[in-house]
Image (cartoon, helix red, strand yellow):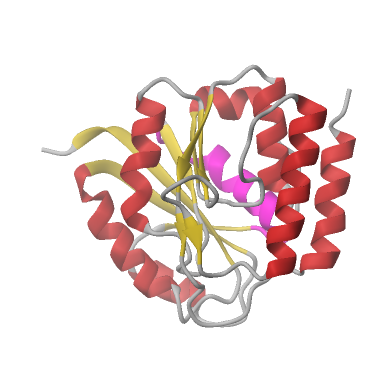
Amino acid sequence: MLLKPYVSVVIPTLNEEKNIAELLRKLRDELARYSHEIIVVDGHSRDKTVSIARHFGVKILYDNHGKGSALIKGMYAAKGSIIVSMDADLSNKPKEIPLLVTGIESGYDVCMGSRFLTGGGSEDMPLLRVFGNKVFVLLVNLLYGTRYTDLCYGYRSFSRRALKSMKLDEKGFGIETEISIKAKKSGLKVLEIPSYEKRRGAGDAKLRTVRDGFKILKTILKNLD
């Protein structure tokens, strides 16, 4: 007999044919303990990402307006009482999903993985990205009265109440920053847990550090009252 809660995992994808099968196999094993669904939101990949994902019987949606737009579309289409967001590049460990689920079951509205808490870490953060993330964390903590340790990391879980409260609209890579800020402004209970980011699998990262860094800064400033 499958155990509740019903967990929805949302994965934005773009040209991840060399990673998606391995990720979905691992997710299938890890999610077997839950009633669950997996939602792939594809940005009109030019490779076989979608056909491979379809072979696993997952729900497939399409959105090519950016990572944030895809993530929002997938989360609002989710049926689960707990929604988990993760990347498609094998950098997020499916074995951490129970920790994200437990955080929501314990009464938190948003549970965010942190690579900078004790027990967390990263194999995939160049020095410039580490510096930029630290600066943005300090800025958000100063401007919004938070105590975050990580900001630009997408491995997170949410209650349905959280999604309704935050009213997300960020289309690009600033989505994690928007979530962090709006969770605070909405009075939601937020928990950070240690998370270990592995080096991405095949292919190149979609994030462009300097260009997307300016967009994240814009997200931080535009949400000020």
The answer to whether residue 130 is magenta is no
Where 211 falls versus 100 (above or below)? below
Residue 126 visible to the viewer? yes
Q: Position of residue 22 (x, y in %)?
A: 35, 73
What span is in magenta? Answer: 63-80
Between 23 and 199, the one lying in front of the other is: 199
Residue at the left extreme, as displayed: 1
Which residue, as the protein is rendered here, is positioned at the far top?
Answer: 187
Question: Residue 23 at what x, y percent from top left?
Answer: 38, 67
Q: Nearer the viewer, residue 6 or 154?
A: 154
69 left or right, relative to 89: right
Picture residue at 68% right of the left edge, 28% below the top: 146
Q: Position of residue 165 (x, y in %)?
A: 64, 22
Q: Give the residue at x 41% y 29%.
A: 104
Q: Does the magenta stretch mainly form a helix, a strand or a loop?
A: helix
Question: Which residue corresponds to the image point at 41% horizontal and 75% vertical from the top-left?
Answer: 52
Question: Considering only vertical position in the picture, is 31 above or below 89?
Answer: above
Q: Quadrant of residue 107?
A: top left
User: Which residue appears at 80% of the width and 61% of the height?
Assistant: 212
Q: Is residue 72 magenta?
A: yes
State the count of labels.
0
Q: Quick check: can you spot residue 65?
A: no
Give the quarter of the figure containing the N terminus. top left
